[in-house]
């Protein structure tokens, strides 16, 4: 079909008149603009538009609504968004989600826990350290021997009833004697060759050297007396002076506990388990225990440590029981069941610091070291010459000086102790 009027052809029309009509020779017909369909997801064109009816071509809805395309129908968008795997959790154009780093989170949590525990442990240490009763001045002790190797503690149990009510005295079977004397004296050596606990019987016949009283200021003359008299005359300082004079061992630290404080420590700990190979009964101390293992409370522990009349060796037998008990007490105090349990640890620390009297240079660290050393220490009495201790001086204990000097030499030089140790 021709687009020109009927009877006209290109050849009939003058060339000049055909100017502007294109090389085809006639006027251009109306052209249909090609419609580019919006790419389907994945970049595939959706195909030609489908007619809607009425004989007209149906344009794409996006085009008819004035939407602007960013790309052609032959490819994807010019500025593609992030790949699906890196898109945000809520829409396709959100920021990428960072992977969870569990190793780092666990590391930070562990570090925070360690820091918290460190702060708690440090606070507990300084709290307990500040509660120690530092009353004994070892610097006032005269003519002291040179320091040896290792560390030496003098552990003293006194019969002081100070602070006890009449009811408590009755419950603890302490009696009502005034003042205070030493029921227990133990020299504990801690060194590279282990620990050694040496009991010094309170009835030991020794020389009490001359001493200037720290309270009275009077010069106390030298005298022959039982060892516990030194404590009664001038307290801890003269007792330390007497022990050093008769053994040649320098005392580095002093620890003292009375009746009431001792019982309170045991009760705070929840009792101490002891095993007896025979029944024990002593009406003087109140001890009454069946054969076998049992947990002793504070009053019962005090009664066991004071009883001596059933022992064949009397006071020497009692000192062995005391060492055995202190080893069990120290082992239970330093056990994980106590240290890791705040409901036991804090009451035990509080009772211990309230009960003890120590020297002015004592720290909680040194006190803890002492308890740990008692757990596995070699236990013995100082060598004696008269096991029955009946002498012209009455019921006094005489030391075997040859063996004593050898034992003290091993202590001073921190050598392996062989004196009094059973093979």
Image (tube, grey):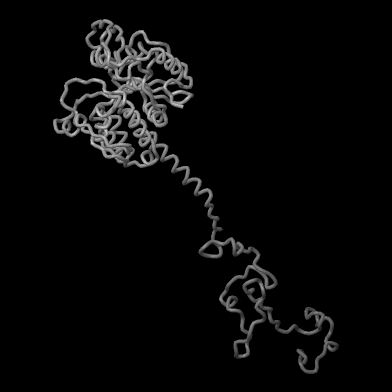
Q: Residue at x 41, y 40 (%)?
A: 117
Q: Relative to 241, is 73 above or below?
A: below
Q: Is residue 61 left or right of residue 339?
A: right
Q: Residue at x 53, y 54 (%)?
A: 100
Q: Answer yes or no: is residue 191 visible.
A: yes
Residue situated in front as seen by the camera: 14 or 264? 264
Residue situated in front as seen by the camera: 129 or 257? 257
Q: Residue at x 34, y 34 (%)?
A: 329
Q: Residue furthest right?
A: 11
Q: Is residue 13 left or right of residue 262?
A: right
Q: Residue 31 is drawn in which quadrant?
A: bottom right
Q: Whole-percent x and y of residue 56?
A: 62, 87
Q: Whole-percent x and y of residue 353?
A: 30, 29
* Count of all numbered marks drawn on residues in the image: 0
Q: Whole-percent x and y of residue 242?
A: 32, 12
Q: Relative to 122, is 225 above or below?
A: above
Report the quarter where the N terminus lies. bottom right
Q: Residue furthest bottom?
A: 7
Q: Answer yes or no: is residue 357 visible.
A: no
Q: Residue furthest left?
A: 166
Q: Residue 276 is drawn in which quadrant?
A: top left
Q: Whole-percent x and y of residue 208?
A: 29, 10
């Amino acid at each position: 079909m021709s687009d020109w009027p009927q009877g006209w052809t290109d050849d009939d029309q003058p060339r000049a008149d055909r100017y502007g009509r294109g090389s085809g020779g006639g006027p251009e017909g109306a052209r249909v603009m090609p419609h580019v369909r919006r790419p389907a997801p994945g970049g595939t064109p959706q195909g030609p538009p489908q007619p809607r009816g009425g004989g007209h071509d149906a344009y794409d809805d996006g085009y008819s609504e004035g939407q602007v395309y960013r790309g052609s129908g032959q490819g994807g968008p010019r500025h593609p968004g992030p790949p699906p795997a890196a898109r945000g959790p809520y829409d396709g154009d959100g920021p990428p989600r960072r992977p969870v780093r569990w190793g780092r989170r666990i590391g930070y949590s562990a570090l925070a826990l360690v820091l918290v525990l460190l702060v708690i442990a440090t606070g507990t240490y300084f709290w307990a350290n500040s509660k120690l009763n530092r009353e004994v001045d070892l610097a006032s002790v005269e003519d002291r021997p040179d320091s040896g190797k290792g560390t030496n503690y003098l552990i003293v149990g006194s019969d002081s009833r100070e602070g006890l009510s009449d009811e408590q005295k009755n419950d603890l079977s302490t009696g009502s004697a005034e003042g205070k004397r030493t029921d227990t004296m133990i020299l504990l050596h801690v060194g590279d060759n282990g620990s050694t606990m040496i009991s010094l019987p309170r009835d030991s016949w020794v020389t009490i050297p001359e001493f200037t009283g720290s309270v009275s200021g009077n010069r106390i003359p030298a005298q022959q007396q039982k060892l516990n008299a030194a404590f009664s005359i001038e307290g801890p300082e003269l007792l330390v002076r007497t022990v050093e004079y008769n053994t040649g061992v320098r005392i580095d630290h002093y620890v003292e506990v009375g009746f009431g404080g001792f019982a309170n420590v045991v009760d705070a700990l929840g009792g101490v388990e002891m095993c007896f190979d025979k029944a024990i009964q002593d009406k003087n101390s109140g001890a009454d225990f069946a054969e076998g293992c049992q947990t002793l409370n504070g009053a019962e522990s005090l009664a066991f440590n004071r009883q001596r009349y059933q022992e064949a060796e009397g006071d020497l037998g009692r000192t062995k029981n005391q060492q055995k008990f202190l080893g069990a007490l120290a082992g239970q105090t330093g056990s994980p069941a106590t240290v890791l349990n705040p409901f036991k640890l804090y009451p035990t620390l509080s009772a211990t610091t309230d009960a003890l009297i120590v020297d002015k240079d004592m720290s909680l660290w040194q006190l803890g070291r002492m308890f740990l050393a008692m757990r596995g220490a070699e236990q013995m009495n100082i060598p004696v010459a008269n096991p029955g201790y009946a002498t012209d001086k009455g019921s006094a204990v005489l030391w075997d000086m040859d063996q004593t000097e050898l034992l003290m030499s091993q202590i001073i030089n921190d050598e392996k102790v062989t004196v009094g140790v059973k093979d």
